[in-house]
Image: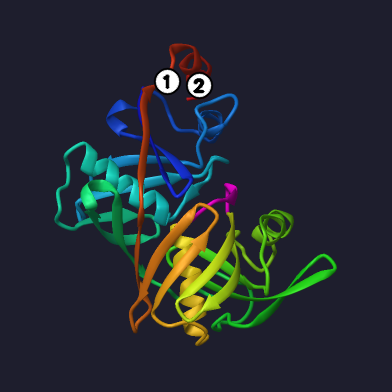
Amino acid sequence: MKFSKYHALGNDYLVINPQDLRFSLTPESIKLICHRHFGIGADGILLGPISSKNTHFALRIFNPDGSEAEKSGNGLRIFSRYLWDIGLVAEESFIIQTLGGIVQSVVQDRGKNVQVEMGKVSFWSDEIPVAGKPREVLNETIHVGDDKFDFCAATIGNPHCVIFLPEITPAIAKQYGALLEVNPLFPNRTNVQFMKVINRNTIQIEIWERGAGYTLASGSSSSAAAAVAHRLGLCDALITVQMPGGEIDIKIHEDFTIVMTGSVTKVAEGELSEELLQIIRPLA
């Protein structure tokens, strides 16, 4: 089984063409393939291109814990670069269907950067979802053990919880991210961003990703955090998001439609060994 590996600011994915797939992608097989000691190692698997009646391509996105994600900004940039590399797209924009909605993508700089129109951010609880009465989830309080945080929630096709802090560190994200991910307020779990506003055009975030854990970068997290900062009047409409893995540029339209631009790097192409396939096949 062939695969291609890419990373987007340190957030790495394996791209598998369904035509090359020789077994079922069960949660068990996904966990094994993504395991950094017993498998290839990745923050997730991108299964595509899949045929679609309404768009140019469709994509399924799997987290390393075996769950399926609605949308991934880094994953979409990587998948777009993969389509470019295998000659299915050129310099014109194209449409991709995800579980979290339709996005429009264009490959720039001969594959080095990809721009994705990510869709519209909503802060409404019934759309994210967040438990409780229908409302915009802005500047609320959430309790984690003996601690509490001010937070906002948003969706761009997948759920996000944005925590404001004067200083952020990887340790904070790792300490509280796992607890916030499964907080009862979020019936579908949630991605978590710990955010520091640097100036009107720059924010810094540390990320705990639902189903993946601590993450060096995230496109959907960048989009959600930037949208929250703009919605509260803390930042302008053009925002650079700084993460441990690098920077993503976000443009926010008046209706909170997001345009994300960031880099993609190809790492490798390869094939799963027969030995590993023999372990996986009984799981199919």
Query: Which residue is more in the foreground, 32 or 22?
Result: 32
In this view, which residue lies farthest toward the bottom?
Answer: 233
Residue 271 seen in the figure: yes
Q: Residues within 10 Å of mark 1 (few under 14, many from 20)?
A: few
Residue under the image location 48 percent in, 83 percent down? 231
Q: Residue at x 53, y 45 (%)?
A: 67
Residue at coordinates 48% horizontally, 41% vertically from top-left? 44
Q: Position of residue 242 (x, y in %)?
A: 50, 63
Q: What amino acid type should be assigned to the residue bearing mark 1?
A: Leu
Say whether marks 1 and 2 touch (CB < 8 Å): yes
Q: Residue furthest front?
A: 199
Q: Is residue 261 above or below residue 164?
A: above
Prevailing SS of the magenta stretch: loop
What SS does tag 2 mark? helix
Q: Where is 56 relative to 224, above or below?
A: above
Considering the image in quadrants, where does the N terminus appear? top left
From the viewer's perspective, tell me whether residue 273 is left or right of residue 81.
Answer: right
Classify mark 2: residues with Cα within 10 Å, few (<14), some (14-19) or many (20+): many
Marker disc for residue 272: 1
The answer to whether residue 127 is visible is no
Residue 212 magenta-drawn? Answer: yes
- The residue where tag 2 is placed is 280
Q: Residue at x 49, y 14 (%)?
A: 278
Three-letter amino acid code of the residue under disc 2: Ile
Percent coordinates x, y for residue 245 in the rendering: 50, 52
Name the outermost residue toward the right: 146
Please give the range of residues in magenta.
210-218
- Looking at marks 1 and 2 on the same chain, the residue that comes earlier in the sequence is marked by 1
Q: Nearer the viewer, mark 1 or mark 2?
A: 1
Along the horizontal axis of the image, is 137 left or right of 87?
right
